[in-house]
Amino acid sequence: MILEAFAQYLHNNPSLPAGQALSAWLWDRLNAEPAKPVDQVIQLEIAIGRKPEQLTNRDLVFLPSEAIETFHKTYGITTAKEKDRFTLVFTGASESGKRLLSSLIEYSHSYEQHRWSKFVHNLKASDFN
């Protein structure tokens, strides 16, 4: 149900890279009134936290830039060093939230690979001349 809602969002926003789309979609779900069960689950299972040091950027979903700017202004974070220490990402609020976020990340990666595959499949040898 949740992957289906995210997939619909991806199809409605084809110009966004899947990672950015996931970030924007999660941010929208967290900021909206929970009108649908998907919104309720996202709000219960997904949280915002500092970037864990041990994870690579591939395993993370960063907040959209406008959300990060809002947090920095709210908490008076102005220097580049402070901003680097206070990097915000979406995290799982529980074990099931971590699995949900991991599944969404994997889905967004596979969606990007699918887009790339379609692009490459449509290329012809004459495109390289």
Image: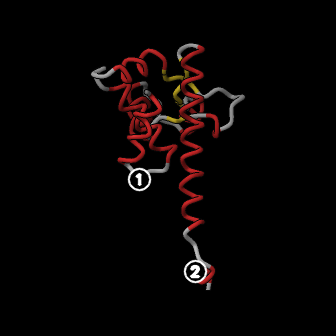
Report how far apart the C-alphas of labels 1 and 2 lie in the structure.
Answer: 23 Å
Secondary element at tag 1: loop
Which residue is at 53% across, 30% downward?
A: 89
Residue 127, disc? 2
Residue ranking furthest to the right: 54
Residue 59, quarter of picture = top right
User: Which one is in front, 26 or 99?
Assistant: 99
The residue labelled by disc 1 is 14
Q: Amino acid at mark 2?
A: Asp
Which residue is at 56% across, 52% downward?
A: 114
Residue 19 x, y percent position in the rendering: 52, 43
Residue ranking furthest to the bottom: 129
> Quick one: label 1, few (<14), some, or many (20+) residues within 10 Å?
few
Q: Would you place residue 128 above or below residue 6 in this image? A: below
Considering only order in the chain, which callout, 2 or 1, is on the residue closer to the N terminus? Answer: 1
- Disc 1 vs disc 2: Cβ atoms closer than 8 Å? no
User: Which one is in front, 6 or 58?
Assistant: 6
Residue 8 x, y percent position in the rendering: 39, 40
Secondary element at tag 2: helix
